[in-house]
Image (tube, coloured by chain):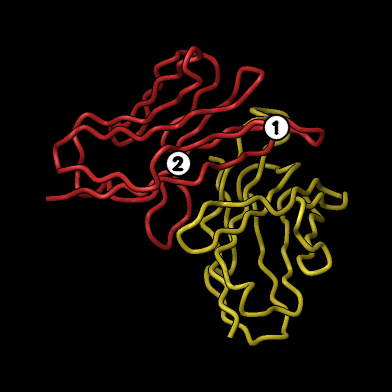
Chain colours: A red, B yellow
């Protein structure tokens, strides 16, 4: 089964600083990878997805992620953090099992943005 | 496009009662639907996968007699928490996969907050 590991349960940055949220995947086949954001008491919002096309994926709200096969990584970045970016971020992989694909989530990383 | 709704958004029930949560795909046919559970400050854990017209497939450790899933149509799946207890209080999120396109992608609903008193 495929899985993702998010390094760091909490990340704190200053407003305007670079945001880097780490995700490593475990997969024997080319994976489908996703980043989601969740604001308090809300559902998930898809930030971006990798589907084996371009390795650098641009998403919404200025986020992007780069798929690096050699490092089995799919880290999420944003050049300049805003206060509104404070939320929980989940890396996810689409795992193909006997019943078809199903999305499996990492443990999540909470992003804090300091003024 | 690809909108999934859930109803209700919040529900409070007494211990021992049952509660039903609906998940609908509004603008596409969902051959497969998924139910996730999220405890406070934790990740989403897949509970079960259901295909329209078939019995749901439950993940290891999920009680199928407690969490009844029905996927009777291509746009509706329901999760019934039977004989709910306070430890069942959680955020339940459904998702749906469209029929024959982008089989790897799921569209998520806004979630239902269940509180059992």
Task: Identify which residue is drawn at 21% across, 32% down.
Answer: A18
Q: Determine crowd level at label 2: few under 14, some 14-19, many 20+ residues with C-alpha closer than 10 A.
A: some
Task: Identify which residue is drawn at 64% across, 50% down.
Answer: B25
Q: Is residue A67 left or right of residue B16?
A: left
Q: Position of residue B5 (x, y in %)?
A: 57, 56
Q: Which residue is mark 1?
A: A1
Q: Chain of mark 2?
A: A
Disc number for residue A36: 2
Disc number for residue B68: none
Q: Is residue A105 positioned above or below A97 on the image?
A: below
Q: Determine crowd level at label 1: few under 14, some 14-19, many 20+ residues with C-alpha closer than 10 A.
A: few
Q: Chain of mark 1?
A: A
Q: In terms of image quadrants, where is residue A29?
A: top right
Q: Position of residue B78 (x, y in %)?
A: 73, 62
Locate the C terminus of chain B and report the quarter of the image it occupies: bottom right
- Which residue is at the front of the view, A10 or B47? A10
- Which residue is at the front of the view, B94 or A68? A68
Q: In terms of image quadrants, where is residue A74?
A: top left
Q: Position of residue A97 (x, y in %)?
A: 76, 33
Q: CA distance from mark 1 to mark 2?
A: 20 Å
Report the label total.
2
Task: Identify which residue is drawn at 40% across, 47% down.
Answer: A9
- Which residue is at the front of the view, A25 or B98? A25
Q: Answer whether labels 1 and 2 touch (C-beta < 8 Å).
A: no
Q: Give the mark toward the camera: 1 or 2.
A: 1
- In primary-sequence order, the first of circles 1 and 2 is 1
């Amino acid at each position: 089964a495929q899985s993702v590991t998010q390094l760091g349960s909490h990340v704190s940055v200053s407003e305007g600083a670079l945001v880097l949220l780490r995700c490593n995947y475990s997969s024997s086949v080319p994976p489908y990878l996703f980043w989601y954001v969740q604001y308090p008491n809300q559902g998930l919002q898809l930030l971006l997805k990798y589907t084996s096309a371009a390795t650098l994926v641009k998403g919404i709200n200025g986020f992007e992620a780069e798929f690096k096969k050699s490092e089995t990584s799919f880290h999420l970045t944003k050049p300049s953090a805003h206060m509104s970016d404070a939320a929980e971020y989940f890396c996810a992989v689409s795992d193909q099992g006997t019943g078809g694909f199903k999305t499996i989530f990492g443990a999540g990383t909470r992003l804090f943005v300091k003024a | 496009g690809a909108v999934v709704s859930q109803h209700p958004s919040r529900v409070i029930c007494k211990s021992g009662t049952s509660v039903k949560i609906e998940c609908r795909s509004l603008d596409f046919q969902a051959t497969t639907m998924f139910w996730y559970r999220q405890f406070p400050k934790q990740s989403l854990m897949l509970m079960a996968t259901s295909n329209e017209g078939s019995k749901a497939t439950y993940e290891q450790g999920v009680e199928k007699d407690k969490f009844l899933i029905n996927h009777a149509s291509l746009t509706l799946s329901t999760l019934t928490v039977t004989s709910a207890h306070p430890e069942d209080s959680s955020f339940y999120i459904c998702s749906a996969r469209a029929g024959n396109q982008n089989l790897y992608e799921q569209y998520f609903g806004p979630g239902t907050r269940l509180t059992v008193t």
